[in-house]
Amino acid sequence: MTDYKDWYEALLIRLNPPRPPIGPHVEPAVRPLPRFFQLPEFKKGERFVATIPTAVRTWWIIGLMTIAAIWFFGIPLAGWWAWIPWKIEWVQGRNVETGAYFSILRILIALAIFTGLSHLIWRLIFPRIIISADQTGIKIDRFTYSWEDAAGFRMGYAAGGVERDEKQLWYHGLRFANGPYSDDLPYMVSNFYVPVYVVLLNQLLELVHVDGSGASNKNEGIKQEMY
């Protein structure tokens, strides 16, 4: 057989030859749901409740900057607050010198406050939202949609032959087709997981609204919405 490799490819293969598997043989379990997707309740033709991790559009960036600022400026302030300076105290009729030291208690209090604030901000900018649907309508966190105008989840849309979507670093905007122009939800989903989340959520909508008049076809979930 003719050797198709050039010298550079041959060198890299020689430097990094195939290796045998490391560790015992593993048979991964088949996932019933996509990673990080939860479906705590499902009754075909009646109701489902799902939760997905999201990032609040734009605010997730501001929140991360705020968390970084809390620790960047907070640690020096905590050190200043925890430092007990050298001093002389009058105790039982005589002067007693007290050496300077760091108060461990104050340091722990400051770290607890910074951790609590960071966790609170994290929960606000990266909420795990609840998506549910029954015969009365569809709820996406605080938004409620009727079946009459709903047509499923989308990753974007196309107008005038130009595809449109919204991305912020590792996150992709999520849309819900509602009426002729749809809604841009304030939540973004990981670029890696958004296609499978959209497809699965649309499948769940179809399984609940069994007459098919509301939810879109599952295959349309990963296509750009057309007007």
Image (tube, rainbow, N blue to C red):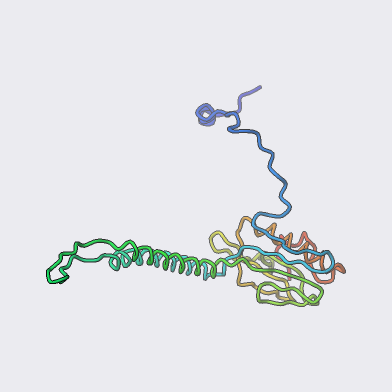
The residue lying furthest to the right in this view is: 211
Residue 217 in picture, x, y percent from top left: 80, 63
Q: Quadrant of residue 80?
A: bottom left
> Considering only vertical position in the picture, is 150 above or below 14?
below
Looking at the picture, tell me which residue is in the foreground, 118 or 144.
118
Q: Is residue 172 above or below residue 1?
A: below
Give the left or right position of residue 88, taking residue 84 as reference.
Answer: left
Q: How many marks?
A: 0
Q: Percent position (x, y) of residue 191?
A: 61, 58
Does 25 sit left or right of 99 as displayed?
A: right
Q: How far from the left and from the top, in percent, is residue 207?
A: 82, 64
Q: Is residue 199 left or right of residue 171?
A: right
Image coordinates of residue 102 in percent, x first then y, are: 27, 61
Relative height, residue 151 to residue 30 (above, below)? below
Q: Residue at x 67, y 64 (%)?
A: 51
Task: Pick whichever, 17 or 114, lies toward us.
Answer: 114
The quadrant in which residue 87 appears is bottom left
Who is closer to the viewer here, 146 or 13?
Answer: 146
Of residues 197 and 176, which is closer to you in this image? 197
Which quadrant is the N terminus positioned in? top right
The C terminus lies in which quarter of the figure?
bottom right
Question: Residue sitting at 83 percent across and 64 percent down?
Answer: 44
Which residue is depicted at the point 65% across and 67% down? 174
Q: Is residue 39 left or right of residue 106?
A: right
The extreme top residue here reads 1
Residue in view at x 60 percent, y 72 percent: 186
Q: Residue furthest left?
A: 94
Q: Quadrant of residue 101?
A: bottom left
